[in-house]
Image (tube, helix red, strand yellow):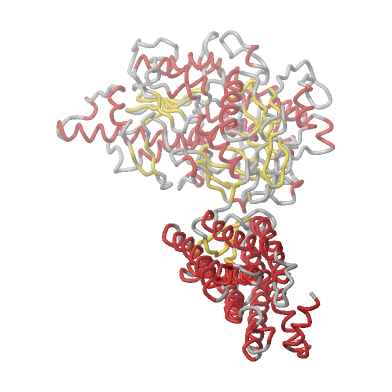
Amino acid sequence: MLFLLLLLLLLPQAISDNFKGSHGGDNNCYFDYYKPKKHVIGGILSLHDSVHSHENFTIIPMCFKKNVFQPLLKRFQHVFAIVFAIDEINKNPKLLPNVTLGFHIYDNFNLQMMSYDTILSLLSSQKESFPNFKCGKKPQISAIVGGLTSDTSMQIANVLGLYKIPQLSYSSVHPALKDKPQFPFFYQMVPNEVSQDEGIVHLIQYFGWTWVGLIVSDDDNGAEFELRLKSVFSRNSICIAFAEKAPRVAFSGVDEYGYKFHYKEEVLFALSVTTANVIIAYGDTYAMKVFQLTLYLHQPFKKTPLEKVWIIPAQWDLTSAFLLKEWDFKIFHGSLSMAIHSKEVPGFWSFLQNFNPYQHQNDLFIQQFWYAMFQCSISNSFAAEVNINLCSGEEMLEHLPNTIFEMSMSGESYAIYNALYAMAHSLHVVYSSRWVLMGEALRLDLWRMEQWELHTFLRKIRFNNSAADEIYFNENLESSIGYDILNMVIFPNNSFTKIKVGRVVSHASSNQKVYMKERDIIWPNKFNLTVPHSLCNERCHLGYHRKVREGEQSCCYDCFKCADGTISNQVDADKCEKCPEDEHPNNNKNRCISKVITCLVYDDILGINLASVAVSFALFTALVLGTFIKHQNTPIVKANNRDLTYLLLISLLLCFLCSLLFIGRPSKVTCLLRQATFGNIFSLALSCVLAKTIIVVVAFMATRPGSKMRKWVGKRLSNYFILFGSLVQVGICSVWLFTSPPFPDLDMLTQPEEIVLQCNEGSDAMFYTVLGYMGFQASVSFTVAFLARKLPDSFNEAKFITFSMLVFCSVWISFIPAYLSTKGKYMVAVEIFSILASSAGLLGCIFVPKMYIIILKPEMNTRDQFFKKKEFH
């Protein structure tokens, strides 16, 4: 730690002194790397950073500020990317033949005010900032690559716009730079931050997280990001558990950790108490390194690691913070970071492996870099000036830990590489077009190409780079390169590796922006290698729906079971849905299952029992009929109109058998026949009963002296009653069948789990008219029989008919509420039961007493017994 602090103190002094000595001047100093060729590509990089807040620097020059700068060594890879790409382009005989590219790189020390000075220096023929003056020969700048931050990019764009010089950014840029009328010559080698915002949202949605914390840098960029993210979150049902500003540190000395500073307790408290397992931390590397230091030094987090899933934007490089070699940053183990998309460019790794600094020992830029890397000098003069040892020659970049320098090409370096190739291809198109127009005889050194000429070709450029990525600009002059999703894995020895686990494709459709390799992700240890949950409360399972708690965010809700007849087949359903008519919810109410088609069939126990009862009564009726036929000449059979008795028994037999039409799978024929058959046969039976009752009354009245009723005694009167009573019902049924006949139908609504195959009666009014007419017949029969029950005749059946009609009326009066209150096949069963019960009532009340006498008391079935009974009465 002490050694690193000493290095931190000495290195800026050495750099500062060398700036002054190298570029001579007490007012201006530069840190640059220059290789002049016919076409020079300028670069404005941020290779150093200040230890203190940028607000402490208000004036230039910077050379005399002591102990204020530190080299961000990992960013020096950006320089190697430029050198590698330029060298590769110049060696390619098919790309820009006979034309070579050079470069002029400046370091702006990550200071906005320094950016203006460097850009003006690039536009001048001298080191001094005198644009528009040409003193001596100096190749013109064809384009400029830069800068690292959006603020720097805007500064550069404002100046270059005056000269119409192409500017190619290599890092995430603010959405404002998308405004092409204001920045018409600004090309983005990476998508703007809005694409990254969308990628973060899609990443959160991919894992089903809805409850996330948010920490942003305490600056305008952080505030704008927070507003953008809240807007996108609200449209995608994602809630922010807390939103805090990253602490701004004010260094005021040195304590046991190396610094004494103050930080915002609100941030640490929010991190300590939040239930969110996912935290988005937004800001650039400078703005967030003090937050990173806060987490490292905070005592509770040192004892109990804060194991959260951090989502980190491309602007923040976790591994670029100062003194990182000594830090324990396992707090970020398992984090997911957005990074500008990159691929391993063939030859870059070996270029870094074989990089020979001694071939560049005259370049102060490489001298200082090597000194910062290995604390030795490749130049005798530099070694003597800063009083350090010469390098042994065995120092190699691949020997550096990845916390200091990475051999794999970073996203920003990849963007720089593509930017240089985009310029090279544009220049190639320009030269090719001139060769076609002017011929090859024209000397190349006499050509002068203005920078504005490149825009027509650069906007339309499309090529495949050596890593097989297609590079082109869209209508907003943005590259389609997209973002990679990296998983940070921290090892116990504080080394790390970045695993590419996904991709955000900016030009893809909204539903296909994120591609993940979930199996490759290493999560924080707390979650035992499983995908973490980050919810305000547990999800509502299938079969439940959610209801937002009053006064809370939409992600905080309670779960309620779906109501009967509805389901929810997705987690966190907003409401339960009804099943289709032919389906019903399962017991868990999480899916719809097909309803069972059901009807009253003979295979059913209920159907078997009803059919058995119907057949049994029919057989008993046939037995009664046979018995009466056998004993037709006995007084008890002859006493009450034998023909009417036979017709009544046949009607009751058919009544019992017609109930079988109601059992079985309904068809067109059975639906047409069953109600009409039942109604007509029952009306015939009731007409017979009414005729028997009327005959009793007429017969009694005919016994009176001088009665005129004698002429009505006989078959003629009974036939009239039977014919008229039956024809009325036949007429009602005929009208029913012709106007609205019954038909087979599927009842999907009555039973929740069944589709009832039934006969739709067509017209309920006609159905109840048929029943009403039978009720009318029964009522008349009951009334007449009741009035005639005490007539003193030995052959009087009025009492038996009264009881039979009482049973009949009781059954069918009970039938109506029972029929209306039952559903499905049980409704049919109720009607069958009513048919059987009422028919059995008639059979039992009228014929069982007579069967008792015929079979068990034959001695009473004699003429003498009837006359004795008559005399008794």
Asked if residue 516 can be seen in this view, the reply is yes
> Where 272 sits versus 643, above or below?
above
What is the quadrant of residue 665 in the picture?
bottom right
Residue 766 spot, x, y in % from top left: 51, 57
Quadrant containing the N terminus in the rendered view: top right
Residue 22 spot, x, y in % from top left: 52, 18
Residue 546 spot, x, y in % from top left: 68, 40
Quick one: 357 or 121, which is closer to the camera? 121
What residue sits 37% from the left and 24% below the top? Answer: 166
Q: Is residue 530 left or right of residue 517?
A: right
Quadrant containing the C terminus in the rendered view: bottom right
Quick one: 736 or 527, which is closer to the camera? 736
Q: Is residue 462 left or right of residue 48?
A: left
> Where 286 sits versus 693, above or below?
above
> Where 853 sits versus 1, above or below?
below
What residue sits 75% from the left and 17% below the top? Answer: 251
Asked if residue 378 can be seen in this view, the reply is no
Q: How many marks?
A: 0
What residue sits 47% from the left and 19% below the top? Answer: 154
Q: Is residue 516 left or right of residue 451?
A: right
Extreme-front residue of the structure: 706
Quick one: 353 or 812, which is closer to the camera? 812
Residue 366 spot, x, y in % from top left: 53, 30
> Where 352 sits versus 435, above or below?
below
